[in-house]
Amino acid sequence: MAWTNKAILDQCGQAVEILAVGTDVTEQKRMEEALKKSNQELTEYSYALTHNLKAPLRAVHNYVDFLLEDLGDTLEEKPKSYLEGMKKAIIQSDKQFKDLEILYHIKNHLMNVEPFDMRELLAEIKSIFNGTPAQELIITHPQWPVFRGEKFLLRQILNNLINNGFKFNSADIKRVEIGWQPSTDNRIEIFVRDNGIGIEPQYHEQIFQLFQRLHTESQYEGTGIGLAIVKRAAQRIGGTLRVESAIGKGSTFYVILPSSILEVNRQEKLYANC
């Protein structure tokens, strides 16, 4: 049985009655257990596959390095380019495995909902990008409310969006702006805006799918997993995503969250006159 209890309050917020409703959820629980078991098996398979493939991949990478070190001066240009190409492909695969591990971690992350100062989180994130060139700027809005939510997942979202804002950008001064604003239906939006190359409207949904790339590896490096990580993390914290973008006009990604993420004592405000 699942019980839902609701307090009936008077005009000053004092409980005068308790309404309790019981529902038989036996069949629902059976389905949830079956789905949980299926998801667990799939997760274990994916995790094992990722880890088991990394070991031989690392070995091949080492052998390529040995060959280049021992034979580099004697190899002709063509076979040497083959080895360099193999090394580059291995490095790219290793990056994909690391991003898949992040995706796995987000799905199975133990949620830790707590109040936090968004300005402190943004300062932490900006410190990660301190080593970027001077022509890459991160601009953050000065005024932020105190949030209550999952800080780790929000950090993953912002890190990936900032990184994309710099990577897919050909401007002389690359800018990424981070701010927030109220949204409709009692929700709020955290946005990340860049002055990058932009995205054609027909691809606004496709870019959030796993391994979906709009550019070749030679044009822009990447794994095709970054925005899938952003989408998965946003869903875990109860949010949705949308993007506004056009070719040559930059992109703005919006993370739309319920207003419950705001750390506000609504009871005190509602009954202040009592």
Image: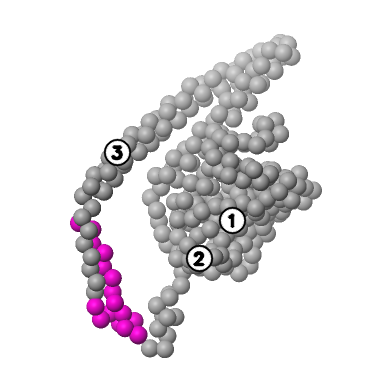
C-alpha gap between disc 2 and disc 1: 15 Å
Task: Of the two numbered discs 3 and 2 on the same chain, state the one appearing first in sequence.
Answer: 3
Q: Which residues are magenta?
A: 1-17
Q: Which corner quadrant of the image does residue 82 belong to?
A: top right
Q: Which corner quadrant of the image does residue 31 belong to?
A: top left
User: Which quadrant, please, contains the C terminus?
Assistant: bottom left
Q: Marks 1 and 2: in contact by CB < 8 Å?
A: no
Q: In this orientation, which residue lies closer to the viewer: 180 or 22?
A: 22
Badge 2 element: loop
Q: In this orientation, which residue lies closer to the viewer: 62 or 165?
A: 165
Task: Of the two numbered discs 1 and 3 on the same chain, state the one appearing first in sequence.
Answer: 3
Q: Position of residue 91 (x, y in %)?
A: 59, 29
Judge the density around disc 2: few (<14), some (14-19), many (≥20) Cα neighbours within 10 Å.
few
From the image, tell me which residue sits under label 2: 185
From the image, tell me which residue sits under label 3: 37
Residue type beneath disc 1: Tyr
Residue type beneath disc 3: Lys
From the image, tell me which residue sits under label 1: 254
Q: Between tags 2 and 1, which lies in front?
A: 2
Residue type beneath disc 2: Asp
Q: Position of residue 271 (x, y in %)?
A: 40, 83
